Amino acid sequence: MNPMLAVEGLSIVFGGLRAVSDVSFAVNKGEIYTLIGPNGAGKTTIFNAISRIYPPGKGRIVFEGEDLARHGRHEIAGLGIARTFQNIELFEHATVLENLLIGRHVHRRTRLWQELVFATSVRRQELAFREAVEKVIDFFDLAHYRDTRVAGLPYGVRKVVELARALAVEPRLLLLDEPSSGLNVEETDDMAFWIHDIRSDLGITVLMVEHDMALVSRVSDRLLALNHGEVIAEGTPALVQNHPGVIEAYLGVAAEA
């Protein structure tokens, strides 16, 4: 079976500093695959390369058989890849509904002149967008916040709204960058359920960067451990977390033989 996403020999250098060095891995359809490692390991750099924010210095990133180097960053969502960020990236003075509708923009098919006169095709499209967004709002139980400006929401709710906006894109691959960052224990538990449901109920493949190892163990099928931009282990959560190189990377001491 061909993987949904294949990263092949990826290397990225910033001003002589090698942020990612010859990293390869593959994510299968329907999988929750997580990148772990200490700060500076290269995890978010890999996400940025997949999102086309950074061009790969060497190597290839292939999504469903399509080399992403052939596409600009503005085309990535249209290919079926959506992303959240460690630092929430929402329009704070827009409502929850408006933020999710922005996520639907990638599916816009009408032309400027049609929108200027609010043609029938535009009205049909807007109704379809609203219907799709309302389904996402229902999925995340956000109806209570639908018309609330993001700036007035608690942090934990904002994290869910950002996740909802990514799903409004209707991705086949969802990139989650530190989804539990800033959340309390109860909110992290809820996030674990959302991630499970996104895969099981919606059939979306998930590639995640995460530091919370309890969350990682609960939701991940496989892990890739990185340190200083290099792969040190890959496999099941139990296998990777007990790998001597992973223990040393996190604790700064070599594991006892």
Image (cartoon, helix red, strand yellow):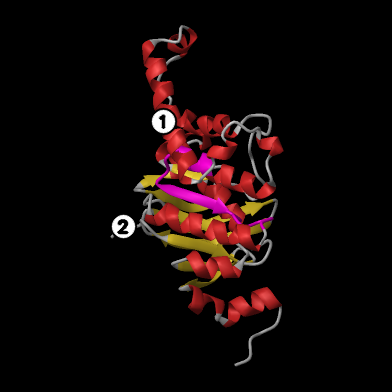
**Mark 1 crowdedness (10 Å alpha carbons): few <14, some 14-19, many ≥20:** few
Where does residue 45 sit, x and y in percent of width and height?
60, 53
Where does residue 178 sit, x and y in percent of width and height?
61, 56
Q: Residue at x 43, y 22 (%)?
A: 126
Read off the residue under disc 1.
131
For the question of whether residue 81 can be seen, the reply is: yes
Which numbered marker is on residue 2? 2
Instruction: Residue lying at the far left in this picture: please name it.
Output: 1
Amino acid found under the numbered disc labelled 2: Asn
Amino acid found under the numbered disc labelled 1: Glu
Magenta stretch: includes residue 168: yes
In this figure, what is the number of numbered marks? 2
Nearer-N-terminus badge (2/1)? 2
Q: Residue at x 41, y 41 (%)?
A: 80
Q: Quadrant of the C terminus?
A: bottom right
Q: CA distance from mark 2 to mark 1?
A: 34 Å
State the SS at label 1. helix
Which numbered marker is on residue 193? none
State the SS at label 2. loop
User: What's drawn in magenta, residue-wise?
Assistant: 164-183
For the question of whether residue 76 can be seen, the reply is: no
Q: Residue at x 43, y 10 (%)?
A: 114
Q: Against 194, is 233 above or below?
A: below
The quadrant holding residue 54 is: top right
Instruction: Residue lying at the far top in this picture: please name it.
Output: 117
